[in-house]
Amino acid sequence: MAVAKKLKTIVVLPAYNAEKTLEKTVREIPKEVVEEIILVDDESHDQTVKIARKLNLTVFRHHKNRGYGANQKTCYLLALKHHPDIVVMLHPDYQYDPKIIKYFVEFISEGRFDVMLGSRIRSRHEALTGGMPLYKYLGNRFLTIVENFISGYNLSEWHTGMRAYKREVLENIDFLKNSDDFLFDSQILFQIVEKGYRIGEIPVPVRYFPEASSINFKRSLKYGLGTLAVATKFLAKKILPWNT
């Protein structure tokens, strides 16, 4: 069997007040497949930047809080300047198992997929016993069903904070026009669907705990309504292609 060429992989960490979980996350990133780790700090009020520098990460700091989506935009722009083959986005809150990155890299380097997602939704029991609040699980399920129906895909989760992209994907979609807030995640996936890129998934354990970042019910509701608006806009564009 032919051995796939080793590709240059960069991990980006969009960070905000991640001092309690950052080191645990970074320690488990498989260094044998990752060449560089870039952390973008969105004006944290804790020791996130100090810890990141201690860990010898490439650090960039926003001088004012710009939002989760804006953080990802900076992450990808910085990563692309370093000419990677693969860019992995990982939340530094230790909700996702960094060791799975090596499988993301393997699937993309072998040419099987252009984008890989880490899905927390394997079963209702596992998601809930892993600490996912019931309202988040139900919201995730509902929104994913709607997004699958509209996009024609059959993903188990559209709302994961662990993703890997082949470089050309990020180069060929206009992610800069997306939201500076949490809607960015759904918008970029719809852009990927629109371009016809291949999306794969790997299940990841569900790990909710007090130190992990999480948006509250009010912001979750706002996010849900915004996601439905994004999906509706995509559907309208499909039905009425001149309505851009």
Image (cartoon, rainbow, N blue to C red):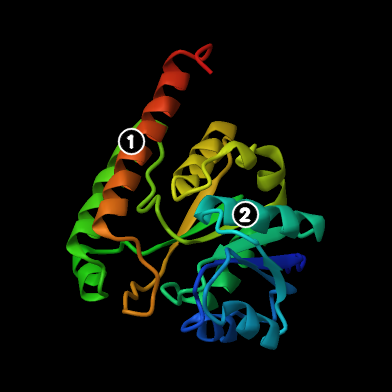
Query: Decide: marks 1, 2 in contact (CB < 8 A)?
Result: no
Is tag 1's residue or tag 2's residue first in the polypeptide sequence? 2
For marks 1 and 2, give the one nearer the viewer: 1
Query: Secondary structure beneath disc 1?
Result: helix
Residue 209, numbered circle: none
Q: Which quadrant would the N terminus be assigned to in this image?
A: bottom right
- Disc 2 residue crowd, few under 14, some 14–19, many 20+, Cα 10 Å: many
Q: Which residue is mark 1?
A: 228
| Kind of residue at disc 1 | Leu
Residue 165, numbered circle: 2
Residue 93 to residue 170: above or below: below
Residue at the (75%, 65%) spot, across then down? 7
How many numbered discs, if any? 2
| Kind of residue at disc 2 | Tyr
Q: Position of residue 217 (x, y in %)?
A: 24, 57
- Between the residue at mark 1 and the residue at mark 2, the CA separation in whole angstroms equals 24 Å
233 to the left or right of 169: left
Q: Position of residue 162 (x, y in %)?
A: 50, 63
Residue 110 showing in the rendered view: no
229 to the left or right of 29: left
Which quadrant of the structure image shows residue 94?
A: bottom left
Query: Secondary structure beneath disc 2?
Result: strand
Residue 29 showing in the rendered view: yes
- Choose between 8 and 222: the one closer to the eye: 222
120 to the left or right of 15: left
- Disc 1 residue crowd, few under 14, some 14–19, many 20+, Cα 10 Å: some
Q: Position of residue 136 (x, y in %)?
A: 25, 58
182 to the left or right of 4: left
Residue at the (44%, 72%) spot, across then down? 96
